[in-house]
Amino acid sequence: MHRGAVADIDLDALSHNLNVVRTLSGDRGVIAVVKADAYGHGALGVSGRLEAEGISCLAVAYTEEALTLRSGGIHSPILVLFDKTDGTEFFEYNLIPVIYDLDSAVRFSEEARRRNRPLDVHVKVDTGMGRLGLNSENVLDDILAISKMDSLNIAGLMSHFSDTCFGGDSIAGEQLRKFVALRERLLPRLKKKVLCHIANSAAVLSSSDAGLDAVRPGLMLYGYSPCGAGVHRTANLKPVMRVRTRILTIRRFRRGTPVSYGGTFVTERESLIAVLPIGYADGYGRALSNNADVLIRGKRAPVVGRVCMDLTMADVTEVEGVKEDDEVILLGSQGGAEITAHEVAAEAGTISYEVLTSLGSRSKRIFKGAAKGI
């Protein structure tokens, strides 16, 4: 038996969501975020479909992720968001580094000069996220200094929102104003075209003003909105991932029988309890103990007792005709019912990003639709 669940990845839904991004963002370029193994969906398969759809650029967190894509036959431009290396891989594999401090700019410049080869870079400024980015009082001078370094070409200017609310007095609104003001001061000094981008999924869905030259969606490509559980429906987004397993065995218990570690669930009637071959080692977190549903035969069945390392129990007393080896949906739809990543995240006290990356990365993935490397 395969350990854990199976994640069905619908690449046609991915293409649909990309079209939603393009519709909302107009003629702007799309930098598709495929870091963290495409949010658990499989970066190579996802990137292959996005490349076939004519994506402008892909974005990963670290060079290792980029090298996996290159070795899998992905040729699109790849932006590396966080890595700080000596720059060797960036030249050998035609990658685009994000510069967020002067020291790394110097190192990249020295390597580019040594190779006698110009290197395109994107410069990141910190407008309020407080994580990475140039943030000195003289940030304009810092960018101009980078622009004068040997063999470096500033091809992009970027920042990162820290909030999903885009009202006039919001944190994100203030970040956007800072970024646009810097852009207006910088571009006349550089005297060339620079791709400016700050809009993430929330901005694509909420604020047309944040689009600038390109948008940088992540979560919405995979069918969800960071702005709330209902937004993916109003934007007509389609979840790309469906996670399933099967019933390992079914047990019949008398009233008053404890189930799983610590006896946190005790049957209040004669009950049928299904044992599922998935646990927290497979990305189905302990916070879901006594606090989530799964779908079996199109009906919700509550998770009962503590989620174990390798097993989880569900009460199937109300599921008519239930039997061993029946399909169990942990995430996705079955019949007329649906369990979304937003729902699971709310039950686990986390966010949909974590649900997708946890379940997706630890499940056996099966891709629906043609893509490279699968």
Image (tube, rainbow, N blue to C red):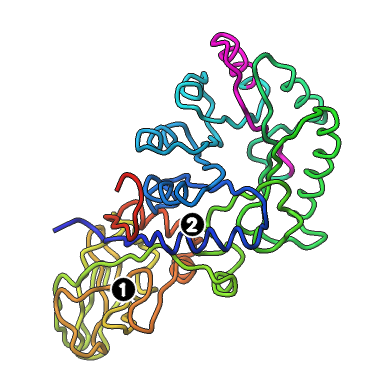
Q: Name the residue that disc number 1 marks.
A: 264
Farthest residue in the top direction?
A: 114
171 or 255, nearer to the observer: 171
In the depicted structure, whether residue 68 falls above or below residue 264: above
What's the residue at 67%, 13% (across, down)? 150
Q: How many marks?
A: 2
Secondary structure beneath label 2: helix
83 or 54, nearer to the observer: 54
Which class describes the residues within 10 Å of circle 2: few (<14), some (14-19), or many (20+)?
some
Q: Quadrant of the N terminus?
A: bottom left
What's the residue at 55%, 71% (across, down)? 236
In the depicted structure, whether residue 140 falls above or below residue 150: below
The numbered dot on residue 353 is 2
Residue 252 is a magenta residue: no
Task: Give yes or no for contact between labels 1 and 2 (Cβ–Cβ under 8 Å).
Answer: no
What's the residue at 53%, 58% (across, down)? 18
Which image quadrant for residue 24?
bottom right
The magenta segment is: 105-127
